[in-house]
Image (cartoon, helix red, strand yellow):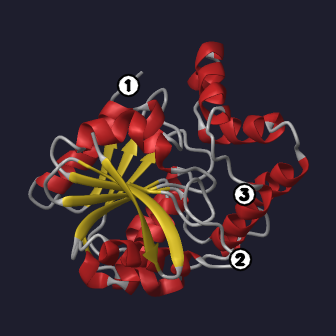
């Protein structure tokens, strides 16, 4: 059993949970989702070896609502403030999608707080895009009273073809999301979307000093391997892991949890990995 708290950090009220003992590992969720998704597969696995910290980003879930626009850098400062509130000096950090963008900003803005860095499905520079799916999702969420259209939009981008052909799995996922007692408000999602779309670290990624692992699914539509490679190439010494096979989607922690978790744990606990790209052939 874990413990939960609300921490005042960077002028935000952030809901967080701590599970397990050991070196701290902070998990940062992507746009529009709260920390609940980490509890399905990642918390039970990593809490056996680490002190796992999960939290709801500002504007989402059980954390406080924002009152004005903010940036990915602001959200990174939230995480630094959360670490202060929990008396954690230094931690491993794992971010998924927008959470990866927050994680890399944390590694840039608060260099001494990040031990090892894992970026899963990171976006390279959405601010440079003339058009981005996040823009569409934000508009649909604001105009879709049922929530079914935005769910269809997101699932078709985030999950693999194999998953989308499994009607039972799709129904179970929709039921899980609809059962969330703290769904994101349209205006909150719009603020997160604005932060996401405005993010462009430019050449600053070269300033990341934490040993870094970039993970991407071979079938990731939202942030395909070429984008992950752009991110990895810009971070000195970063390792790129491309997960191949069925279920190798944007949401690897949900579709391929055992393989994903093992990759992350190996990176966090082993000697520093060799530089370069490794193509995983697990799954079929």
The mark closer to the camera, 2 or 1, is 2
Quadrant position of the N terminus in the picture: top left
Dot 3 or dot 1, earlier in sequence = 3
Please tell me whether residue 24 is drawn above or below residue 79 in the rendered image: above
State the mark number for residue 283: 1
Query: Can see residue 273?
Result: yes
Pointer 2: what residue?
Answer: 67
Q: Going 69% across and 70% down the picture, which residue do you hit?
A: 197
Using the rendered view, name the quadrant where residue 70 is placed.
Answer: bottom right
Name the side, left or right, on which 190 lies relative to 123. right
Q: Earlier in the sequence, mark 2 or mark 3?
A: 2
Mark number displayed over residue 134: 3
Labelled pair 2, 1 in contact (Cβ < 8 Å) = no
Q: Residue at x 66, y 15 (%)?
A: 167
Residue closest to the far left: 271
Say whether disc 2 or disc 1 marks the residue closer to the N-terminus.
Answer: 2
């Amino acid at each position: 059993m874990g413990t939960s708290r609300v921490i005042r950090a960077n002028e935000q009220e952030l809901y967080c949970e701590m599970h397990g003992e050991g070196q701290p590992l902070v998990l940062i969720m992507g746009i529009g989702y709260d920390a609940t998704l980490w509890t399905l597969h990642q918390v039970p696995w990593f809490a056996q070896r680490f002190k796992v910290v999960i939290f709801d980003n500002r504007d989402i879930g059980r954390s406080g609502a924002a009152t004005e626009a903010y940036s990915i850098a602001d959200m990174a400062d939230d995480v630094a403030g959360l670490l202060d509130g929990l008396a954690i000096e230094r931690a491993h950090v794992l971010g998924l999608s927008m959470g990866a963008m927050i994680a890399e900003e944390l590694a840039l803005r608060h260099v001494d707080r990040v031990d090892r860095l894992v970026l899963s499905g990171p976006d390279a520079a959405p601010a440079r895009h003339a058009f981005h799916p996040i823009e569409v999702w934000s508009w649909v969420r604001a105009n879709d009273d049922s929530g079914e259209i935005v769910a269809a939009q997101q699932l078709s981008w985030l999950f693999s073809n194999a998953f989308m052909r499994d009607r039972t799995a799709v129904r179970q996922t929709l039921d899980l999301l609809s059962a969330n007692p703290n769904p994101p408000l349209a205006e909150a999602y719009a603020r997160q979307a604005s932060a996401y779309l405005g993010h462009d670290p430019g050449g600053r990624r070269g300033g990341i000093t934490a040993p870094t692992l970039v993970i991407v699914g071979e079938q990731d539509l939202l942030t395909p391997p070429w984008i992950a490679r752009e991110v990895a190439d810009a971070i000195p010494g970063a390792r790129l892991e491309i997960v191949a096979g069925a279920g190798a989607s944007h949401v690897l922690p949900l579709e391929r949890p055992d393989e994903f978790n093992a990759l992350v744990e190996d990176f966090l606990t082993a000697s520093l990995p060799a530089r370069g790209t490794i193509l995983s052939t697990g799954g079929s």
